[in-house]
């Protein structure tokens, strides 16, 4: 009998994509043992839609949370459930991750060729092109700036990474039992990077170029010349600072980096034309991030939620 795999999908109000994601897991050449869906209190009839398509069976475990706990809360509960099931490997993805049919075959092949490694990830494609933002190396342990893995990395054998997103990472149960669950108080963004840093303390992480997952995201609005407010930006920067402090090699230097970075962003907000019309919003956001980090205040912020 081969290694067992539990695949966790966190979803919220994207039933059509969710169905596509499930079908991609059911079509794997290396079979998935269990699909665990964590529904963040969807209101679009996701479960009923899957029932109509006959996608809910003994292989699919569908869990509806009482409220939207964000991606971080969803993965927390999903991993908790998977560990209780004692599966050998646990994969993580959102409802917009569509796996190539040989994804897990390639991952398991990589694990057999590198038995000392207990965490893997694959190549992430977005809109038909490789997206380097999901796999990275850490440049330093003060600011935790990343060097993202571009196309040149994917032309050879599996290569080491420090950071993965929760788009197709696969972690052995032995590592999860050592490091525990993701920090659910991150709510959204950065929880995957922080978790990767913990994983990397216990095992090397390899990216397998021939394991491919398609990340079906919508093109981002705006460009470098214009600014479009996004409530997720608050969590992006706040949570980056949280895990920088937690994993820093020198916390005093990291706090200096955080303070200097916020000052630079505030000055840019005041002088750059692209922030015209949003200066007050952005300055308030940066101030909220500063006090959240200084007070170690995680969780949801009611100012920065969908629709706000």
Image (cartoon, helix red, strand yellow):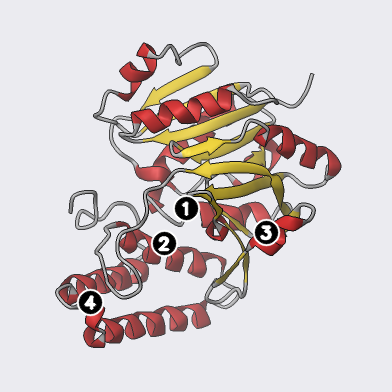
Q: Which residue is mark 2?
A: 239
Name the front one of labels 2 and 3.
3
State which tag comes first along the sequence, 4 or 1.
1
Q: Is residue 164 above or below residue 70?
A: below
Residue 250: where, in percent of width, then height?
A: 57, 78
Image quadrant where one finds the N terminus: top right
- The residue drawn where x is 71% and y is 48% is 208
Badge 1: few (under 14), some or many (20 or more) residues near its Cα, within 10 Å?
many
Do we see residue 181 in this rendering? no
Residues at marks 1 and 2 touching, judged by CB atoms closer than 8 Å: yes
- Element type at marker 1? helix
C-alpha span from label 4 to label 1: 28 Å
State which tag comes first along the sequence, 1 or 2.
1
The image quarter containing residue 294 is bottom left
The image quarter containing residue 265 is bottom left
State which tag comes first along the sequence, 3 or 1.
3
203 sits left or right of 271 in the view: right
272 sits left or right of 146 in the view: left
- The residue drawn where x is 85% and y is 42% is 113
State which tag comes first along the sequence, 4 or 2.
2
C-alpha span from label 4 to label 2: 23 Å
Q: Which residue is mark 4?
A: 275
Q: Which residue is mark 1?
A: 191
Name the front one of labels 4 and 1.
4
């Amino acid at each position: 009998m081969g290694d067992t795999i539990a695949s966790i999908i966190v979803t919220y109000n994207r039933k059509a994509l969710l169905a596509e994601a499930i079908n991609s897991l059911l079509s794997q050449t290396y079979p998935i043992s269990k699909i665990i869906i964590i529904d963040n209190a969807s209101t679009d009839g996701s479960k009923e839609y899957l029932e109509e398509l006959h996608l809910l069976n003994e292989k699919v475990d569908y869990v509806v949370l009482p409220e939207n706990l964000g991606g971080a809360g969803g993965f927390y509960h999903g991993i908790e459930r998977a560990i209780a099931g004692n599966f050998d490997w646990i994969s993580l993805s959102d409802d917009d991750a569509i796996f190539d049919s040989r994804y897990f075959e390639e991952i398991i092949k990589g694990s057999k060729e590198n038995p000392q490694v207990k965490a893997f990830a694959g190549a992430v494609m977005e809109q038909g092109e490789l997206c380097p933002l999901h796999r990275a190396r850490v440049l330093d342990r003060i600011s935790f700036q990343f060097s993202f893995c571009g196309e040149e990395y994917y032309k050879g054998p599996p290569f080491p990474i420090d950071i993965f997103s929760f788009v197709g990472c696969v972690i052995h149960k032995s590592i999860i039992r050592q490091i525990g669950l993701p920090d659910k108080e991150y709510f959204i963004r950065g929880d995957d990077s922080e978790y990767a840093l913990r994983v990397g303390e216990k095992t090397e992480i390899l990216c397998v170029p021939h394991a491919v997952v398609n990340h079906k995201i919508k093109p981002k609005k705006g460009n470098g010349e214009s600014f479009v407010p996004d409530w997720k930006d608050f969590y992006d920067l706040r949570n980056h600072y949280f895990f920088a402090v937690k994993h820093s090699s020198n916390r005093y230097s990291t706090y200096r980096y955080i303070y200097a970075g916020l000052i630079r962003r505030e000055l840019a907000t005041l002088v750059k034309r692209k922030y015209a019309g949003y200066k007050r919003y952005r300055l308030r956001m940066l101030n909220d991030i500063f006090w959240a980090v200084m007070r170690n205040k995680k969780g949801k912020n009611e100012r920065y939620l969908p629709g706000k």
